[in-house]
Image: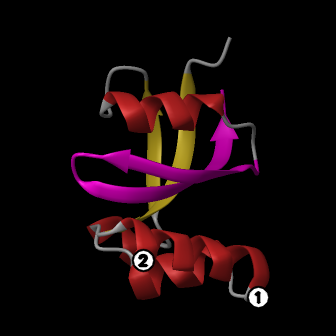
Amino acid sequence: MVKEVRCAHILVRGQDVAQAVLDELKFGGKSFEKLAEEKSLCPSGRRGGDLGWFARGNMVREFEKAAFSLKKGEMSGLVRTEFGWHIIKCLDTR
C-alpha cells in the first residue's frame, strides 16, 4: 500500500481557467513544470509545482483522494478544493 506520494500541482481560480490549463497540458506541448511556473497561484509553482513527499492526512480531503489515486507519472483531471482548482501530477510513490 502506498504510504506517501510526491506530487506536483497547478492551482488556479475558476473551472474555466483550470480546463484551459488542462487542455494546454494535453494538447499544447508545454511541460507540466513550465505551466506550473507560468500559471499556478501556489508558491510551489516556482518549483514546477512540486509539493514534495506527503502522507495521508496532510492535505485537504479532495486533494488527497485524487493524489493517492494516481500512479507514478499520471495526471489528474480537475480537482476542486477550498483553495481553487488543481491539476495534480504524481511524481513518485513509496
Query: Which three-letter amino acid code belongs to the residue tagged 2?
Result: Val
Q: Residue furthest left?
A: 82
**Secondary structure character of the magenta stretch overall:** strand
Query: Which three-letter amino acid code belongs to the residue tagged 1?
Result: Gly
Q: Where, by quadrant of the figure, is residue 21 drawn?
A: bottom right
Residue nearest the viewer, comparing 49 with 79:
79
Q: Quadrant of the N terminus?
A: top right
Magenta stretch encompasses residue 91 = yes
Is residue 16 positioned above or below 30 on the image?
above
Q: Which residue is mark 1?
A: 29
Q: Is residue 7 left or right of residue 23?
A: left
Magenta stretch encompasses residue 9 = no
Q: Residue 49: where, in percent of width, then height?
A: 46, 66
Q: Residue 79: where, in percent of width, then height?
A: 46, 48
Q: Quadrant of the C terminus?
A: top right
Residue 17 is tagged as 2
Q: CA distance from mark 2 to mark 1?
A: 17 Å
| Mark with earlier residue (2, 1) | 2
Is residue 32 positioned above or below 67 on the image?
below
Q: Which residues are magenta?
A: 73-94
Q: Is residue 92 left or right of residue 50?
A: right
* Whether residue 27 is visible: yes
Is residue 26 positioned above or below 30 on the image?
above
